[in-house]
Image (spheres, rainbow, N blue to C red):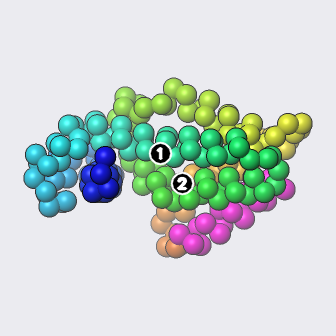
Amino acid sequence: MSRRQSDTKADIRRVALELFTQRGYEATSLREIAERLGVTKAALYYHFHSKEDIVRSLFGEHLAALDDLIAWATQQPPGPDLRAEVIDRMLRLSLDHGRQTMQFALANQHVVRDLHPGKENMFERLRTLFEVVTGPGAGVEEALRIRVALLSINTTVFAAQGLGATDEQIAAAVRDIADRLTR
């Protein structure tokens, strides 16, 4: 896929997510997405054949980023440095993709339930990440602290909506919360 096609697909996902979140999945048409982008409906169909394809792509992109994080983490030695880096990478993932995707998911739960690819093994992915970050020999409390810290990232980023905080302020607060949990 060319860089331009990749950019176009990303633009379509971004605009669709905005409209799905603002107006609802059912109330948004492919025509409206195309109009917002300033392209023809045929051009939109070149990249995505349906709204369902767009939603699958949104979640597929997020899952691929999580898979990349897990693959990277498995190549690192366990310890505090790995924990800090995984927290930072999860935070970037959440700020880049998670906030609006979470809004969409909450507002359109039935769509997510029906179309989310990989939802069946999401816990398996997270469990793998937990095990890699925790490392061997961790006690129950330490393992739970790490799990709660990682799970809290998306929740905290989502909870920060409406506070009028910048991404930098949110990131600093999330890092501090995660750091306190993992001490």
Q: Is residue 62 above or below residue 120?
A: below
**In the rendered structure, which amino acid carries the disc numbered 1?**
His
Residue 157, located in which quarter of the rendered image? Answer: bottom right
Residue toward you, 48 or 115: 48
Say whether marks 1 and 2 touch (CB < 8 Å): yes
- Under circle 2, the secondary element is helix
User: Residue 178 placed where, x, y %?
Assistant: 72, 57
Give me the disc on residue 93: 2
Q: Is residue 34 magenta?
A: no
Q: CA distance from mark 1 to mark 2?
A: 8 Å
Q: Is residue 83 above or below residue 109?
A: below
- From the viewer's perspective, tell me whether residue 20 is left or right of residue 166: left
Of the residues under marks 1 and 2, which one precedes in the sequence? 1
Prevailing secondary structure class for the magenta stretch in the rendered image: helix
> Which residue is drawn at the image coordinates 71% and 43% (left, top)?
75
Q: Is residue 179 magenta?
A: yes
Give me the disc on residue 135: none
**In the rendered structure, which amino acid carries the disc numbered 2?**
Leu
Note whether residue 110 is visible: no
Give, as a single range, the part of the protein colored magenta: 167-183
Note whether residue 82 is visible: yes
- Which residue is identified by label 1? 62
> Which residue is drawn at the image coordinates 61% and 66% (left, top)?
171
- From the viewer's perspective, tell me whether residue 125 is left or right of residue 7: right
Residue toward you, 107 or 126: 126
